[in-house]
Image (cartoon, rainbow, N blue to C red):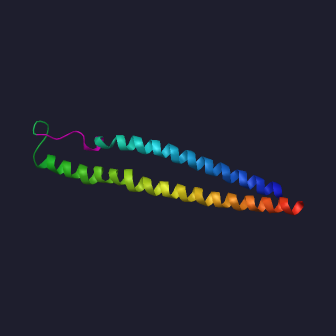
Amino acid sequence: MLSFYYAEKARKEREVERLQECRSSLEGKQGEFNDNEPKCLEPELTLKTWHGNHASDFDDIRDAGIHTPYLEIAGEQFQKVYDKIANKIASLKEEIAELQRLIDQILASRS
């Protein structure tokens, strides 16, 4: 019985570690994602490159169809993922603490 609790606690600790590594990796990816944001607005449209109604339409589509969703991903959607990871880590840590209490009770009852 005691070995089961130790194994379960170790498994949950590994899950916490993996989630923390995932969060760290995701932070790096978010940095890369943010660094690439200006590419959504390339090429810059000027009177020398492209202008007129089609250029304006293209610019509107690029802003509403690409840049705005890109910003949503970079901000709100990344934050939702971070929140879910943080909640899962907190939940696992509570489970680990409960397992440790059970282990301590079993050990104390054996004395």
In the rendered structure, the answer to whether residue 60 lies left or right of residue 2 reads left
Residues in magenta?
39-46
Q: Nearer the viewer, residue 19 or 63?
A: 19
Left or right: where 61 falls relative to 33: left
- Magenta span: predominant SS is loop
How many callouts does the rendering have? 0
Query: Dividing the picture into quarters, in which one does residue 99 lie?
Result: bottom right
- Residue located at (53% from left, 56% from top): 86
Q: Quadrant of the N terminus?
A: bottom right
Q: Residue at x 11, y 43 (%)?
A: 51
Let me know if residue 44 is in the magenta part: yes
32 lies above or below 62: above
Taking the spot 20% from the left edge, 52% from the top edge, the residue there is: 60
Placement of 38 over or under 94, stated as above or below: above
Tell me if 100 is positioned left or right of 111 in this view.
Answer: left
Q: Kindly give the residue lying farthest to the top in the view shown.
A: 48
Q: Position of residue 29 (x, y in %)?
A: 44, 43
In this orientation, which residue lies closer to the viewer: 105 or 77?
Answer: 105
Q: Is residue 104 magenta?
A: no
Q: Residue 12 at what x, y percent from top left?
A: 67, 54
Quarter of the image for residue 4 reads bottom right
Q: Residue 74's spot in the image, x, y percent?
A: 38, 50
From the top left corner, tell me how far across and down residue 43 is, in percent: 22, 39
On screen, residue 24 versus residue 44, left or right, reads right
Q: Residue at x 33, y 53 (%)?
A: 69
Image quadrant for the C terminus? Answer: bottom right
